[in-house]
Image (spheres, helix red, strand yellow):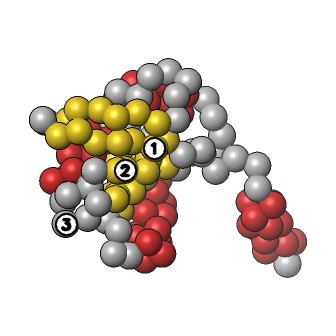
């Protein structure tokens, strides 16, 4: 039974590639954090939903879950919508919540944000088109 888990949260989209991209990131995190379970949950349109993946992590024994929004920057979804679904008080980065009779500690991570590694990826994309 895992004591920790990671929940990668995506927006959800009618475009299949968007779901694939978020799922790919979750799979890569799973490899980096093995044997810690990593699940993906979507706000809307795609399955599984945030709550379903949260419940699955708890069922696997996770009592501390790190929630990472797969969003480039903060916005209404990262500051209000996701935290509301999870039961994290607005403006807080952690909370202990009750889910189906289980007490679980949620640690809310920052979105991707400004990072030199993102600029490197964008540079690669531009250079590829320049060739």
User: Which quadrant would the N terminus be assigned to in this image?
Assistant: bottom left
Name the residue: 40% across, 33% down.
Answer: 95
| Marks 1,2: beta carbons within 8 A | yes
Q: Is residue 57 above or below residue 108?
A: below
Q: Residues within 10 Å of mark 3 (few under 14, many from 20)?
A: few
Q: Earlier in the sequence, mark 3 or mark 2?
A: 3
Q: CA distance from mark 3 to mark 2?
A: 13 Å
Name the residue: 20% across, 46% down.
Answer: 55
Name the residue: 55% across, 24% down.
Answer: 91
Q: CA distance from mark 1 to mark 2?
A: 6 Å
Q: Is residue 126 left or right of residue 8?
A: right
Q: Which mark is residue 1?
A: 3
Which image quadrant for residue 38?
Answer: bottom left
Secondary structure of the residue carrying numbered label 3: loop
| Marks 1,3: beta carbons within 8 A | no
How many dots with numbers?
3
- The answer to whether residue 30 shows anywhere in this view is yes
Q: Is residue 16 above or below residue 24?
A: above
| Residue at the disc numbered 1 | 107
Q: Earlier in the sequence, mark 1 or mark 3?
A: 3
Q: CA distance from mark 1 to mark 3?
A: 19 Å
Which of 94 and 131 lies nearest the eye of the viewer?
94
| Residue at the disc numbered 2 | 65
Q: Which mark is residue 75?
A: none
Q: Is residue 8 left or right of residue 1?
A: right
Secondary structure of the residue carrying numbered label 2: strand
């Amino acid at each position: 039974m895992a004591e920790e888990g990671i929940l990668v949260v995506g927006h959800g989209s009618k475009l299949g590639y968007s779901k694939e991209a978020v799922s790919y990131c979750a799979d890569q995190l799973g490899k980096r954090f093995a044997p810690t379970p990593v699940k993906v949950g979507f706000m809307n349109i795609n399955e599984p939903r945030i709550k379903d993946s949260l419940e699955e992590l708890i069922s696997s024994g996770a009592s501390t879950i790190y929630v990472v929004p797969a969003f480039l920057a903060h916005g209404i979804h990262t500051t209000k919508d996701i935290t509301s679904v999870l039961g994290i008080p607005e403006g807080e980065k952690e909370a202990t919540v009750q889910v189906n009779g289980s007490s679980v500690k949620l640690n809310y991570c920052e979105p991707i944000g400004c990072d030199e590694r993102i600029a490197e990826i964008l540079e690669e994309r531009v250079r590829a088109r320049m060739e």
